[in-house]
Amino acid sequence: MKIIVPIAIGAVLLWAAWASLSQLGFSQLSLQNLALWGDSFGGLNALFSAAAFVAVLTTIRMQSKELKRQQREIEEQSNRLERSELNARLQQFEVTFFQLFELCRELREKVIFVDDDHEERVGQQAFDYACTDLKFRLSSILAPQQTSDQIAARIGPAYEKHVHIKAELSLGPYFRTLYTILRRISENGDLSEQDKARYGNLVRSNLSSPEVALISANALTPAANDLKRYLIEFRILKYLPEDNFKDLLRAVYPAETFKARD
């Protein structure tokens, strides 16, 4: 618009000047002279038409630039809003994650395992004793030549009979919370694969070997849903100590379960 106003003013001044100059050549008023005087504006009208066409093109070009600028601003604002929303969701996930993480640690300290002699063991001692007892019982019912399906069919029921039933009230909340943590990490669409691996590693580093052993046995029971899938995804069994029980687990879990994800 800034360029159109000077053009318009210039056109009016040019037209007025042309009219004044052309009248000087017609001192006598007559129909012939008036006709000639009117015809003299033809060239000026052509010039005005060309100037108007240029002004229209200039206006269209300026409007196009303005629309592109506005479009860029809208896209940048939209990107900023999306990044802001993503950061807010990631922050909320992290807050929830560490709340569940802390809850899982608290529930671990409250796990109570009652052995056959009715002696209670609490917290990490409960996991230590239950793990040792399960490994002992499995050693008497499993043979190396058995298939993976046969091994899995023995580990799950043995865990239910000799561990879970003796600590169901305290183990249940612990395993459900751990399952929820792993599922939330796996299913979160905002996390990158690197972030998922980092959170998974944090969970794994908080688990003792007896805990991992019992978790891997629990995942082979019907009530565990798809816990086994998350143990595989986050390589929870990676740092299990080398022993006969780990050899049994290698038969029922894929090799990737024992490898690093990151």
Image (cartoon, rainbow, N blue to C red):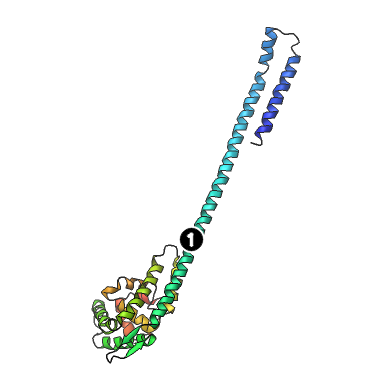
Residue 104, quarter of the rendered image? bottom left
Report the front residue among 101 and 79: 101
Query: Percent from the top left, x then y, of residue 237?
Result: 37, 78
Residue 121, quarter of the rendered image? bottom left
Q: Secondary structure at mark 1?
A: helix
Question: How many numbered marks appear?
Answer: 1
Q: Which residue is tagged 1?
A: 86
Quadrant (top left/top right/bottom left/bottom right) for the C terminus? bottom left
Residues packed near mark 1 inside 10 Å, few (<14), some (14 to 19) or many (20 plus): some
Tag 1: residue type? Leu
Query: Percent from the top left, x then y, of residue 82?
Result: 49, 56
Residue 221 seen in the current view = yes
Residue 256 seen in the current view = no
Residue 153, quarter of the rendered image? bottom left
Instruction: Residue at 63%, 27% (x, y): give it.
Output: 50
Quadrant (top left/top right/bottom left/bottom right) for the N terminus? top right
Report the front residue among 192 and 177: 177
Residue most toward the bottom? 117
On screen, residue 155 above or below 186: below
Locate residue 76 relative to residue 99 in the image: left or right. Answer: right
Instruction: Residue at 69%, 25% (x, y): give it.
Output: 12
On screen, residue 1 above or below 164: above
Instruction: Residue at 37%, 74% (x, y): give it.
Output: 177
Query: Percent from the top left, x then y, of residue 79?
Result: 52, 55
Query: Percent from the top left, x then y, of residue 48?
Result: 64, 25
